[in-house]
Image: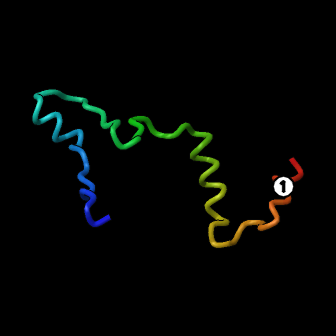
Amino acid sequence: MAAMASYRPGKSAAQAEDEHGITDAIKLASNENPYPPVPAVVEAIAAAAGDVNRYGDHRAADLRAA
């Protein structure tokens, strides 16, 4: 591991815009999505957020029943 090169992140969209004289660049190299999540996803995250302080069912009863 010591011989491996360290991680070097890519340029930001703003840096690419400045360097290439363009506007509205979208960074895709880091598996980033330029679009926000759809409303249903936001709602699902908000609904689940109230239970993040609890451990899930270690038996996965709902999953096994499905």
Name which quarter of the figure residue 58 lies in: bottom right
Report the front residue among 7 and 29.
7
Left/right of residue 22 with respect to residue 62 in the rendered view: left
Q: Is residue 5 shown above or below 31?
A: below
Report the front residue among 9 and 53.
9
Q: Is residue 33 shown above or below 2?
A: above
Report the front residue among 51 and 3.
3
Left/right of residue 12 with respect to residue 40 in the rendered view: left
Which residue is pictured at 25% across the width and 62% down the height?
Answer: 3
In this picture the colour scheme is rainbow
Name which quarter of the figure residue 51 lies in: bottom right
Seen from this angle, which residue lies furthest top? 22
Q: Position of residue 25 (x, y in %)?
A: 25, 31
* Label 1 crowd (10 A; few <14 / some 14-19 / many >=20): few
Residue hosting label 1? 62
Which residue is pictured at 63% across the width and 72% down the height?
Answer: 53
Which residue is pictured at 78% across the width and 66% down the height?
Answer: 57
Name which quarter of the figure residue 16 lies in: top left
| Residue type (three-letter) at the residue carrying disc 1 | Asp
Which residue is pictured at 21% across the width and 43% down the height?
Answer: 11
